[in-house]
Amino acid sequence: MKNILVLIVVSTMLSCTFSNPEKKPNVVFLLIDDMGWMDIGANGSTFYETPNIDKLTSEGVRFTQAYAASPICSPTRASILTGKNPARINLTQWIGGPGNPDYERNLPLEEVLFPEIMQEAGYKNIFLGKWHLNNRAGEGKFWPDKQGFDINVGGHFRGGLYIKNKYFSPWNIPNLENGPDGEYMTDRLAQEAADFIDVNADSSFLLYLSFYQVHAPFSAPEDRVEKYLKKQKQLGLTDEEKFKEGTFGDKTFTYRTKQDHPTYAAMVESMDMAVGKVLSKLKEKGIDDNTIVVFFSDNGGLNTSEGIPTSNAPLKYGKGWLYEGGIREPAIIKWPGETKPGTVSDEVITSMDFYPTILEMIGEPLRPDLHVDGKSLVPLLKGEKEKIHDAVYFHYPHRSNQKGSPSSAIREGDYKLIVFFNDNRQELYNLKDDIGETHDLSKELPEVRERLYSKLEKWWDDVDARFPKEYKKP
């Protein structure tokens, strides 16, 4: 499947028109970077404004218990494209992060990604934005255009724009020409996406818009920031009680308890504006009724380090942790004519599930030999079935930049067990009764703890999970 002729073009070379007389449904996949579960209005945010995303929820299915495979970006991004848990392919760390245990630095080319299957089915595919699935040495060799995308706009090894104000042109990154000085990256990606739709409206396409937003550095156009500075004052959100001190083992850290960061809010709204531009273009071209839209985030909101810009409350902590704040994500699927608009689902789903779901929605056969850990959500989307997973698993055996400790977790039903490797600590929570993971039940319910640990151990063996060098399994 890798011997596919791939057309390599840069972002401005969108003039070639493709056609597909069968006109299978288009797919628009909107992947947000570092966006927390509570960062959209539909999930309860009262400070950030996301009218376009909220409208999308009214047109599709909003999932309240959707999980990223990892609390860190690169592993989750790999899980979406491969349908496999990151532990199974040993891509468990953000690429460029510390390597204890060691991990894959490039998404292996032998993995067959769902865009490749769509490409073989006649789709024309564009990738826009953050890739972060190869290292510097893998530049050009492991880019999106080598793995199922005809066009790669901006995808390269970096996981963020890093340098202060580099959301504004000149960006000086591959595959995306610098814009006029001061052009905002998120606005530019939205325009590139709209241009692609203009040219390819008569064909079947996959548009994979992978935002750099809302990852650090925190910057946005001044007028958008000013709006939220005023809102912050109007709501009286300037008190210092918004921060609290947390502890984990011998570590102490600060975390945010309220959403009131003006620049972060402006970044969220800028991303929402970009989503609105893409959705409006679909409607303008008359293809919105034949376009599937998926909205998701790669990990929880940044809550315990690096600027502490958002709060995931009532969820605990955020990015870099296997507590709910680090892995529970906003998720929406719009499938015109098939899903009941405005549906809210409380069923557990994972980032691996998008692969088989998209295949089934576009009429392609499932490939369980490929998407080993993903389950199609089509029965759930059609209201024919409720439970998709008996249990879901997470494995992040690294120290995170956000103070998180190497850990693994299993969720089965309402119970969730987290195993922390440094001190072999186990914490058990009933998420139905305690969504904030405040009351550890590991001593009160030893039989539940032991049963879940036994399942987690078996899963470790099944996926050949790696562990920190100093960890010795009991």
Image (cartoon, helix red, strand yellow):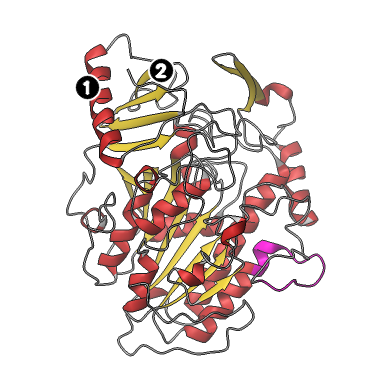
Horizontal side of residue 10 vs 422, given as left or right = right
In the displayed structure image, the side of residue 175 where residue 325 appears, left or right:
left
CA distance separating discs 2 and 1: 16 Å
Task: Please name the amino acid that badge 2 sits on.
Answer: Asn
**Which residue matches tag 2?**
424
Residue at point 53% right, 86% down?
A: 199
Left or right: 79 as drawn, with respect to 279: left
Q: Nearer the viewer, mark 2 or mark 1?
A: 2
Q: How many marks?
A: 2
The magenta stretch is 176-188
* Residue name at image x 59 percent, y 46 percent: 96
Where residue 393 sits, quadrant-wise, is top left
Q: Amino acid at mark 1?
A: Arg
Q: Is residue 9 visible?
A: yes
Q: Is residue 12 above or below residue 406?
A: below
Which residue bears the numbered disc 1?
451
Can you say which quadrant of the picture contains the C terminus?
A: top left
